[in-house]
Amino acid sequence: MAGIYIHIPYCKQACHYCDFYFSTSLNSKQAYLAALAKEMDLRMAYLADEPIHSVYLGGGTPSLLTEDDLAGIFNELNRHFSIAPDAEVTLEANPDDLSPQKLNQLRNSPVNRLSIGIQSFEDEDLVYMNRSHTVAMGTEAVQMAREYGFKNISIDLIYGTPGLSDELWRRNIRKAVALGVQHISCYALTVEPRTALDHFIRSGSITGPVDEQSSVHFEILLEEMKKNGFIQYEISNFAREGFYSRHNSNYWLNEAYLGLGPSAHSYNGLSRQWNVRNTNQYIRSIEQGKVGFELETLLPNTIYNEYILTSLRTIWGTDLNRIRMMGENYLRTCEKEVQKYIQSGDVIRKESQLFLSDKGKLIADRISSDLFAV
Ligand code: SF4
């Protein structure tokens, strides 16, 4: 199931924790959209005419685009690629952009899934993160999206912020469930280098997240999601039956995807490449008839390590038969290193599949890195 990701590199304001590529100036938007259409010309062969089952507009903040901007992008997509009639078309949106007029426009566009950046149902948290909306705006945006007929809505939540007690986090999850969304992505707040959050914590003006608190929040998350019938199909992603994100699943199941726009990544099973992380440089290189990107040809060790990293985190688990096909040496490494985690109850082996237990999910990164080939 091949997919296309389009990066929209614009935001209204900078969230303090964010290290995605974006600009708060929209001056280059028209030139960027023209360059995006040209990039489609240059890269239409990348997915070798495979039908596209997932289109994902991420960013940045794609909901900042106007109705005409979006119509232009979808026209170009249809002109260059064979988008499957039942493709999942997701648009990331911030609550403050989702006015009734906007939702009406989106309902009349190919977008059939919204991923709304709620992040928290606590205003204090939203201020800490420098989000551009309030809790009331977030709640109303989800309710209105449902009223306007969106039947596939995902929301993002962040836990581990210093002001978020265990009880407040539990209340956040319950509010998310009560809103009737089909998909919830939950991430622990992390302090990325060179973000505003990093700077404020270093200068002592605010406190940062504490690992122990995030671990407790993760345990609460698993408990509440299970209780409410959500399926944890990846460590940070929960969905109602039939609502797994195709875009995310493509990534975890090693399907090919084409990334368009500055900083967007592409993958075709043999190599991984990432576009230049600067909109002006991106536009200039496209205008000269080439895409500015870096490329990594995937060596056998990388293919194995990436498979371990992505598969172990998912409901589908790690398939030892597939590892055998990569090479007996990888199978030996994996089976030897995983033994201690099977004994400690962090990994469960069912025939030729490995899965993380709930306890193991708390140390997923450590387990994966222990299984890596070096
Ligand atoms: S809206 Fe999203 S992409 Fe933009 S700064 Fe905030 S988190 Fe980052």
Image: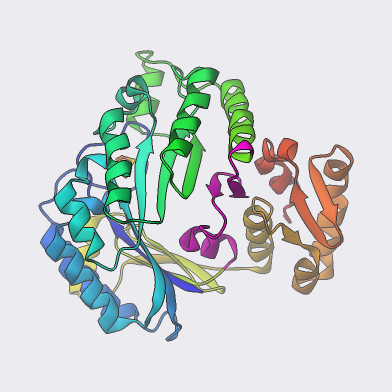
Tell me: 351 left or right of 184. right
The image quadrant of residue 125 is: top left
Quarter of the render that holds ligand 1: top left
Across and down, in percent, residue 252 comes to: 58, 60
Across and down, in percent, residue 150 comes to: 33, 56
- 340 or 214, which is in the foreground? 214
Tell me: 256 left or right of 143. right
**In the image, which residues are magenta?**
227-254
Is residue 228 rendered magenta in the image?
Answer: yes
Q: Residue at x 37, y 23 (%)?
A: 122
Across and down, in percent, residue 88 comes to: 41, 67
Q: Give the answer, above or below, for where 255 lies relative to 236.
A: below
Q: Residue at x 69, y 53 (%)?
A: 312
Residue ranking furthest to the top? 204
Q: Give the answer, above or below, for where 273 lies relative to 23.
A: below
Tell me: 220 left or right of 268. right
- 68 or 290, which is in the foreground? 68
Display colour scheme:
rainbow
Count of numbered marks: 0
Q: Residue at x 44, y 32 (%)?
A: 175
Across and down, in percent, residue 288 comes to: 20, 75
Is residue 189 visible in the rendered image? The answer is: no
Q: Give the answer, above or below, for where 269 lies relative to 215.
A: below
Is residue 290 rendered magenta in the image?
Answer: no
Q: Give the answer, above or below, for where 256 lies relative to 118.
A: below
Is residue 148 visible in the rendered image? The answer is: yes
